[in-house]
Image: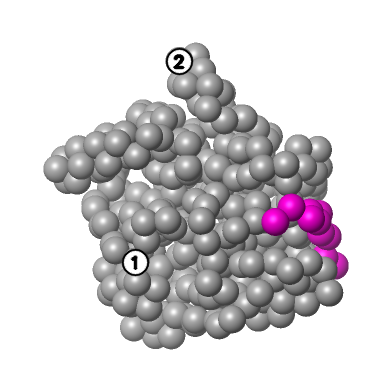
Amino acid sequence: MIYYESSSFFFDSMNYQTSKYLMLIRPRNFSSNEETLESNEFQNDFTESTNLSQIREHVDIEFTNMIDRLSEHKIDHIVFDDIEDLGSPDAIFPNNWVTFHGDGAVVLYPMMSPKRRNERRIDIIEKLSIQGFSVTKTINLSHLENNGQYLEGTGSMILDRLNKKAYACISSRTTREALAVFSNTMSYEIIEFSSTTNIPIYHTNVMMSLGEDTALVCFDVIKEKAISKKLKSELTDSGRTVIDISIDQMKNFLGNALEVRSKNNEKYLLMSETAEDSLTVEQKKLIQNRINLLSFPIPTIEKYGGGSVRCMLAEIFLDKSGLK
């Protein structure tokens, strides 16, 4: 089933860093994916006493509440149901397998975990087209999996869409070879770096968020200090409010935030309640002076999925002509 919140407001997707349309997947097989545990220090495994049925009930409640709050704040979104037979434990995180671009391109990405590869669904792209979104081409990079090269969408890369730059920390799930293919295909400049705590940070979007008005970055985990200094300078010079987040705040998913626009063209910074609770009073004031802050309680999703609000949202920058 598809659920859709529509808007008649014209949106020029080519000239914005932030989207007015979001895609989410309601999960059916949510679980702690054992294939991603080693690379994701934010994810927890199940114990012998874990009640999977109860966890999935909690996840559904958290997901439904998030959808309801998006609607309350007039933030456009389309929700697709996961297909139970696919057995995808991480379907709730669609931003890893697909990106949608203002020129009509849809890009499908190579995923490290074999269990996640079923998340790539052509039927969803076809349904978006039926719903009035303009898809001009589909670029499938999944063949890179055959050579052990991975790039997990806007988990692996933080896209500066206006300046055609992609920021990426190298990890087992973000390889240089795959980044080079994306760069050549989509004409993006790649700014790569090493980012680590005890192990390499698995996805760039847990330590960095880039909107039009805000940039949340954990500079402390970037190993190349010259890159860290240059990045901070570039973001400050761009006029954004730059929030330097601590490692502890990063571990509370503060970096996993997303700036979006509502139907009324109001700007929102979306994050989890866990992330918002980690903000200092000064940081919160800096954000709220520029943009609306909207948070969601998703502790179960964060604990066992190892991802937060940003991971649950795939931005749709495709032009939209209206419902067909």
Looking at this rendering, what residue extends furthest in the top direction?
A: 281
- Amino acid found under the numbered disc labelled 2: Glu
Residue that carries the numbered disc 1 in the rendered image: 188
**Residue 137 as seen in the image, left or right of residue 216:** right
Magenta residue check for 50: no
Label 2 residue SS: helix
Occupied quadrant, residue 318: bottom right
Find residue 276 and report its horizontal and vertical position in percent: 56, 27
Which residue corresponds to mark 2?
282
* In the image: residue 165, left or right of residue 231: right
Q: Which residue range is magenta in the image?
A: 1-10
Image quarter of the C terminus: bottom right
Dot 2 surroundings within 10 Å: few (below 14), some, or many (20 or more)?
Answer: few
Q: Is residue 79 left or right of residue 253?
A: right
What's the residue type where badge 1 is placed? Tyr
* Nearer the camera: disc 1 or disc 2: 1
The secondary structure making up most of the magenta span is loop
Question: For mark 1, does the 10 Å Cα neighbourhood hold few (<14), some (14 to 19), or many (20 or more) residues?
Answer: some
